Amino acid sequence: MTPEPAGPPNSPATTVPPAPPEAQRSSEGDWSRQLSDAFAVLLGRPLEEYDPDAVYAASVNGNLMYETGFARDPAWVRPAALRGGQPVVWDCPLFDESDRFPTFDAGGSVFDFSTSGEGTTVLPRDFADAVDTVCFGRGLVRGADLAPLVERYGVDLADPALAGAWTVFFPRLVSDGTLLDALRAALDTGHAPEQLLPFEVEPDEEWQEELAAIDHPRLRAHLGYFCTDGEEGLMPLLDDATTGGLQDEGCRPVVGWEDGHGQIDIRVVRLSDRVAGPPRVPRTPSYR
């Protein structure tokens, strides 16, 4: 008995067409709305109550950055990084559950040139004077303002001879300047549900009722890591949040997190105009 043919020869395989761009944007917008609502639980107020025109930044600091030497890594001061064209990657995951490396924006970061050390005595005088003119206080300068000076005077700040002349003071994580994106960078949620980290830390009892308002179970578990006493996860800082030394420059704290050992310190800060500088990247739209 001859079997019936399964179908016409060379018939194309059945494929699922990709979602149209409009559907993809709708999905991204829905996830951003969920993140916004969840972040509001941590802040105790909706994101819409914050100034939408202000510039917000997330930073990572703490003893680990200095113990590993990353605060003076030459990658920070390469011209392409200072111009904002090349991110600075720290090959040190912040969380045991993650294999992602923190990515920083050198152009939007703040550098300290008031550091004492041997390197301060060998900076070319004309370059040192030029840096002084763009500092906004106590030897602090934005990477984007430093970039043209490095190229104009031909100074290689990555030279080991100049290692004592500078340190990164406010290491800014890559984000677009909105509060939503700064929080996304600080909390390492990624940009889609599948990028959430598999945290299994039990949040403090005082936070469990608030976190219950987050419907998405994996997002609730992820953010629960940032609501502990700082021993297994990170401890939230609301009223005690700081600006990372930028309060005298007009910046204001939003929220922060730290571990119980001084190794990791994450903060979100509202930048003043002089610290933020002119806009450099498009901001994500509001999803409200």
Image: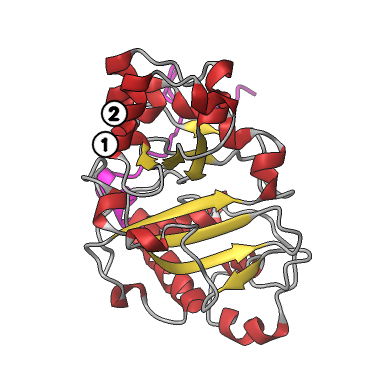
Which of the 4 quarters of the picture holds residue 221? bottom right
Q: CA distance from mark 2 to mark 1?
A: 5 Å
Is 112 covered by the magenta stretch?
no
Residue 180 place in picture, x, y as percent: 38, 61
Q: In the rendered structure, are the residues bearing label 2 and label 1 in contact, judged by CB atoms less than 8 Å apart?
A: yes
Residue at the (39%, 16%) spot, across then down: 155
Residue 226, given in percent of the width and then of the height, sits at 63, 66
Q: Is residue 20 magenta?
A: yes
Can you tell which mark lies on residue 212? none
**Quarter of the image holding residue 286?**
bottom left
On the rendered image, what quadrant is the N terminus found in?
A: top right
Q: Residues within 10 Å of mark 1 (few under 14, many from 20)?
A: few
Q: Which residue is mark 2?
A: 130
Question: What amino acid does circle 1 point to?
Answer: Thr
Q: Which residue is mark 1?
A: 133
Residue lying at 25% horizontally and 40% vertically, measured from the top left: 280
- Per the rendered image, the range of residues in magenta is 1-27
The amino acid at mark 2 is Ala
Q: Is residue 277 visible?
A: yes
In the picture, measured across the screen, residue 95 lies left or right of residue 115, that is right
